[in-house]
Image (cartoon, helix red, strand yellow):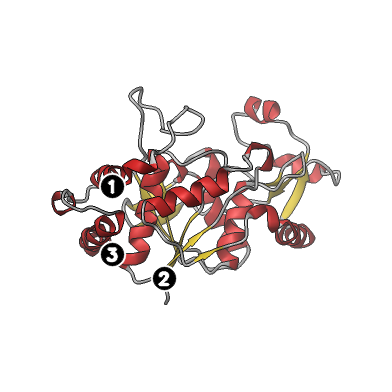
Amino acid sequence: MEYIGRFAPSPTGPLHFGSLVAALASYLDARAHNGQWLLRMEDVDMPRCQEDAPSLIRDTLHAHGMQWHTETPAQSARQTDYHDCVSRLLSHQMAYFCECTRKQIKAQGGVHNKDCRDLCTGSGAVRLLNDSPVQRFTDRFLGETVISDLHALEDTVLRRRDGLYSYNLAVVVDDIAQNVTHVVRGEDLLDTTSAHLTLYRTLNATPPTYLHIPIVKDTNGNKLSKQNHAPALRTESANQNLREACAFLGLSTTFMKQCTSPGKILDIAVKEWRKKCDLLG
């Protein structure tokens, strides 16, 4: 089976060190398996996206020596596909309309009251009918993993009350359409994997293999993110950025110290990642 991986950033701002680590891990894994590495702009939450962010992200990846085989259509261009998927699930009674608010769900303990399925009115959010969640899977890094978080038990939102399609729907529909076989991403998304696997099973599609890596945190122990004001990467420091990202991923940087270009650092990093893959599988 051909390996197809992807890096799928949300274009809500420039890349920071945490997103570089995620990009690098997925890039190295694809190269180590002689596979394809796709780039996809996950702009499904369009109000949060910035117009210049996609070009900033591309420029930053290029400056760090990472080239993608194909850039897939952005999610904003795939609304028809999401509409068709939701319509199909509704027509097969695998999804339903729900008018419950977040406040109501919180009052119920954080899990959606499934009794309201019979009260659907044809308006509100659209939720996946989730009677049998997939809570167990094998992660290449974490091994046998069981998800007990509310994400696993919830009737996942597929289309929001405001009409926007959810990340959980879009990412699965996109990965199926783009034949993604391997997903490498941060462990902050680990709990959503249950929702994704449940949707794969509902759609009768083969899920990818997952590898969740540790996330980068700031000095206060919070995830390094745009919301936490993580500084944008300085492209003039690409070599040092890559060395630090490799070190964070547990790769030996001994032979990278004298490298004068991102490409040379990445070539060494691929070899180091292959050693890691021998252990990960």
Label 1 CA crowd tier, 10 Å (few <14, some 14–19, many 20+): many
Give the residue at the far right of this rendering.
Answer: 121
Residue at the image point whose x is 56% and y is 43% from the top:
53
Give the residue at the far bottom of this rendering.
Answer: 1
The residue that mark 3 highlights is 281
Determine whether the residue tagged by mark 2 lies in a helix, strand or loop: loop
Kindly report the distance in space between the C-alpha atoms of the residues bearing marks 3 and 1.
28 Å
* Circle nearer the N terminus (3, 1): 1
Residue 281 point in image, percent of width and height: 28, 64
Kindly report the distance in space between the C-alpha atoms of the residues bearing marks 2 and 3.
13 Å
* Circle nearer the N terminus (2, 1): 2
Q: Are marks 2 and 3 in contact (CB under 8 Å)?
A: no
Give the residue at the far top of this rendering.
Answer: 220
Q: From the viewer's perspective, is the residue at label 2 or at label 1 nearer?
A: 1
Residue at the image point whose x is 75% and y is 60% from the top:
80
Apparent side of residue 85 relative to residue 232 in the rendered image (left or right): right
Tell me if residue 193 can be seen. no
- Amino acid type at circle 3 is Gly
Seen from the viewer's position, the closer of residues 224 and 277 is 224
- Amino acid type at circle 1 is Asn
The residue that mark 2 highlights is 3
Residue 252 point in image, percent of width and height: 17, 51
Q: As displayed, is residue 41 above or below residue 222?
A: below
Quadrant in which residue 261 is drawn: bottom left
- Amino acid type at circle 2 is Tyr
Seen from the viewer's position, the closer of residues 206 and 81 is 81
Residue 204 point in image, percent of width and height: 60, 68
Label 3 CA crowd tier, 10 Å (few <14, some 14–19, many 20+): few
The residue that mark 1 highlights is 239
Q: Are marks 2 and 1 in contact (CB under 8 Å)?
A: no
Q: Are marks 3 and 1 in contact (CB under 8 Å)?
A: no
